[in-house]
Image (cartoon, rainbow, N blue to C red):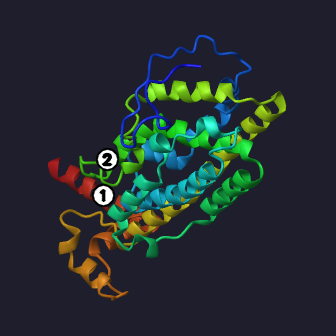
Amino acid sequence: MPSVMENSEGGDEGESLRYEEMEDDNVSPTDLSELLKEGTKESHDRAENTQFVKDFLKGRIKKELFKLATTALYFTYCALEEEMDRNKDNPVFAPLYFPLELHRKGALIKDMKYFYGEDWKEKIQCSDATQQYVDRIHHVGQHEPELLVAHAYTRYMGDLSGGQVLKKVAQRALKLPITEEGIQFYTFENISNAQKFKQLYRARLNALDLDKNCKERIVEEANRAFRFNMEVFDELDKIGRSLVEEAQDGGVPVHDGKGDIRKCPYYADKLAGNAAAGCPYHTVVALAKQPIMQLILAACVAVAAGAAAWYVM
């Protein structure tokens, strides 16, 4: 197994993890890391092609939706890291226990405070899809701890890979501070080289003393973890579509007109509790999208074009 210069088991808290060069030349097709890589390819592709992820990667994500996604991550990692702590001395999981390097709960609390304020706990709740994911993690950690490997692998390896792309997209799309408030979840301060850490993690996976049947069950559970994540993505996508509909109807908080939304008297009236208030901009846009109005507009354009042609002649 690759040697490590410093890690959380032997170093002082707060130090970054540094690694010697680690090669993957000796990986066998029967190694757990390879079985997971090959066995979850289809699930990985499906997850990447969910509408929520595709929109996210294109920078099409509203701040309110990103806050809900961060909330889902908070509940997920609270469950995952609670079960990891519970099994930190269990030989079927102990080699993968890297609390200093990997644990995300502390970072997520910072993000929650940034988005929701100091009283953030009173403003959030666990969604239905996330709760199902959380329940499964607790079941595995308490009754089938060897399967906890699948959930840790799926989450943390993804965070260190594609998660870094999402971090940049979110920071740019939501105009988050360059000091990384709101995206602390994606920042691994105690990992100096993500690629080498992932190599170490895979080596630890392959060193676990597991039989063929157990490895197959772990791969199956990893696919199950992907499905839980996709269900959360689908849930977020539905919420995102409702936010778009509210915007089209002239609802708060999205405003598609020019200028500062806070200076719009109709927006202020809406916030003051006047349900009848409506922004003329949104009203015109909504009417223009009606089929009958589109026909009328097209007819008007045709008449105007004919009149202009006659005048020129």
Q: Element under label 1?
A: helix
Residue extending farthest right: 213
Query: Residue at 43% across / 29% down in the picture?
Result: 6
Q: Would residue 83 appear left or right of 290 to someone viewing this image? A: right
Indicate the position of residue 253 as horizontal and vertical percent values. Answer: 34, 70
Q: CA distance from mark 1 to mark 2?
A: 43 Å
In depth, the one of 104 and 62 nearer the eye is 104
Q: Can you say whether 84 is above or below 131 in the image?
A: above
Judge from the rendering whether residue 92 lies leftward or rightward of residue 277; answer left or right.
Answer: right
- In the image, 123 versus 266, the foreground residue is 123
Q: Which residue is mark 1?
A: 301
Q: Secondary structure at mark 2?
A: helix
| Relative vertical location of residue 99 with respect to residue 209 in this rendering, above or below | below
**In terms of image quadrants, where is residue 276?**
bottom left
Q: Residues within 10 Å of mark 1 (few under 14, many from 20)?
A: few
Mark positioned earlier in the residue sequence (1 or 2): 2
- The quadrant of the picture occupied by the N terminus is top right
On the question of residue 37 being in view, the answer is no
Residue lying at 29% horizontally and 76% vertically, measured from the top left: 279
Q: Position of residue 51 (x, y in %)?
A: 53, 48
Pointer 2: what residue? 171
Q: At label 1, which amino acid type do we have? A: Val
Q: In this image, 130 relative to 305: left or right?
A: right
Q: Give the residue displayed 60% in from the left and 42% down from the top.
A: 152
Q: Nearer the viewer, residue 62 or 198?
A: 198
The kind of residue tagged 2 is Gln
- Residue at horizontal 20%, vertical 53%? 308
Whether residue 262 is visible here, answered yes or no, is: yes
- For residue 92, above or below residue 83: above
Question: Is disc 2 surrounded by few (<14), some (14 to 19) or many (20+) residues within 10 Å?
Answer: some
Number of the label disc, if any, that sits on residue 50: none
